[in-house]
Image: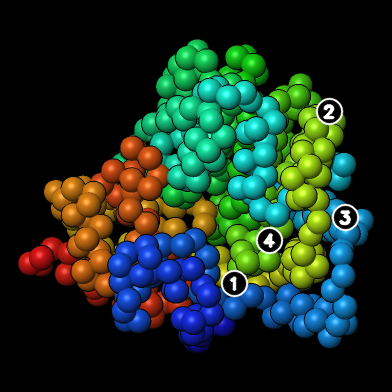
Amino acid sequence: MSSLFDQQHQRIGTGAIKWDANLQKFGVNDENAIPMWVSDYDFAIPPTVASALQQRVEHGVFGYTQIPSSYFATIKEWYASQHELELNMDWISPISGVMPGVALVIELITEASDKIAVQSPGYGKFNFAIQMAGREVEEVRLKHNVGKYDLDLEALEQSFRNGCKAFILCNPHNPVGRIWTEQEVRSIASLCHQYGVWLISDEIWIDLALPYQRCWSALNLEEYFHSKLIVASAATKTFGLASLRIANMMIPNPQVRAAFEKMKATRFLDLFDAMAITATQSAYSTGLDWLEELKAYIQGNFDYLDRFLKEHLPQLQMMTPQSGYLAWIDCRNLNLSDDELRNRFIEIGVLPSVGTEFGEGGSGYVRLNLGCPRDRVKQACERLTQLIGPS
C-alpha cells in the first residue's frame, strides 16, 4: 500500500542545501546524483502544520513577533505526553537553533582555552563551535562493539581528570543512532557532578526514537544535578522544519538562565520568526499521528538497507539504529582511505557524509540519510554494489 512518504518532491532549485549545494560540497553538478548527506527529510511536513502555516500567511501581517505563553505550554504538554516528564516552563529559553544555543552556552560557561569533551564519532558542528570559541576539543572515543556503540566511561572520566570543563552529550546520538539509557545518562551525570563538569545534552533527536525504543531525557535528573545542566531540543528535526529556525534551551539553573537570556539580547537573538513559532506549536499539538507513521516508514528504510547489505554487499555493515533516520555504515573492509572512500561514493552517484566529518572515530565510515522515499533508498542500494567494482 502506498504511503504518504512514498511521494517524490522536487527539491532541486528550491535552495535546499542537500540538493543545491552538491557542486560546492562534492564538485558534482549531476541531477542524477543521490544526495544523502544533509540530515533533513525529503518528505512534506505534516498536513496539519502546513494548514496552520497557510492560515498564518493568510493573516497577512508579519511584524515583530513575541513568543506567546501558549508556545511554552505546548512544549510542556508534549514532554508530559511523550516523555512522561513534568517540564518546568520557566526553564525554556527559545533560540534560533540548537547549534546557536550550544555556541552561546560554550561562551557563557567556559573560558578561552578551556577543554570541552565530545564523543567520537560525534556531530562535527560541536567541534567547530568549540574551536570557533577559542576552546579546545577533547574527543572521547565510543566503544565499538558488534553492530553498535557503547560509552567508554573510563575514557570520559579521564577527560574530566585532564581538566575538561564541559561535556556535550548527543542523545540520541548523531551519527551512530544510539539511545543512551537512563543508567548511562545517570552515570555520565554522576561523573560530571563529581568533577564539577557542565553537562550539555543535545536532545534534538529525542522524538525520533524508532518503534519499540524510548529515550530518557537528562531533564529527568534530580535537582542536585541541575546547577550545571543544560538541555537543547527542537521540533525542527522531528517534523521536517529545519528552515523554520527555532529551538529551545532548557536551563534549570535560574542564574545561568538569566545570563543566557542577557547574552541572547546582546547578540540580538531574542526575536523570532512568526512562522517558526506557528509551525512548532502546530507540530507538537497535531503532528503525533504523522510522526508515528513516519517512524514506522523510516524503520522500513533501515530494514531494507540492512537486508540489502547482508545479501549483496556483506563487506559493509550498518550499525543497528535506535533513533533517527541516519544510517552509519562501516566501510573499513573496503580497505580504502577516507579520501578514496569519499571519491568512490561520488563516482557511483551516492553523496554521503564521510565519517571523518564526525571526528577521528569516524574514519572508515559513512553516514547516509534515509529520510527519503523508499524508491530512492532502493536506487541508492543498487548503486552501492558498484563500490566493489572497478574504480
Q: Residue 293 carries which label?
A: 1
Closer to the camera, 347 or 6? 347
Which residue is denoted by mark 2 in the rendering?
255
SS state under label 2: helix
Q: Label 1: few (<14), some or many (≥20) within 10 Å?
A: some
Specify which label sits upstream in the sequence, 1 or 3.
Answer: 3
The mark lying in front, picked from 3 and 2, is 2
Q: Distance between the residues labelled 2 and 4?
A: 26 Å
Q: In which quadrant of the rendered view does residue 273 lie?
A: bottom right
Q: Nearer the viewer, mark 4 or mark 1?
A: 4
Q: Name the residue type under label 1.
A: Glu
Above-or-below relation of 107 to 305: above
At a point 52% along the width and 57% down the height, the residue shown is: 324
Closer to the chain start, of discs 4 and 1, is: 4
Residue 337: percent from the left, percent from the top? 18, 48
Horizontal relation, residue 350 to residue 277: left or right:
left
How many neighbours does mark 2 have within 10 angstroms: few (below 14), some (14-19), or many (20 or more)?
few
Of circles 1 and 3, the one toward us is: 3
Please give the residue where the numbered disc 4 appears in the rendered image.
245
Mark carried by residue 73: 3
| Amino acid residing under circle 2 | Gln
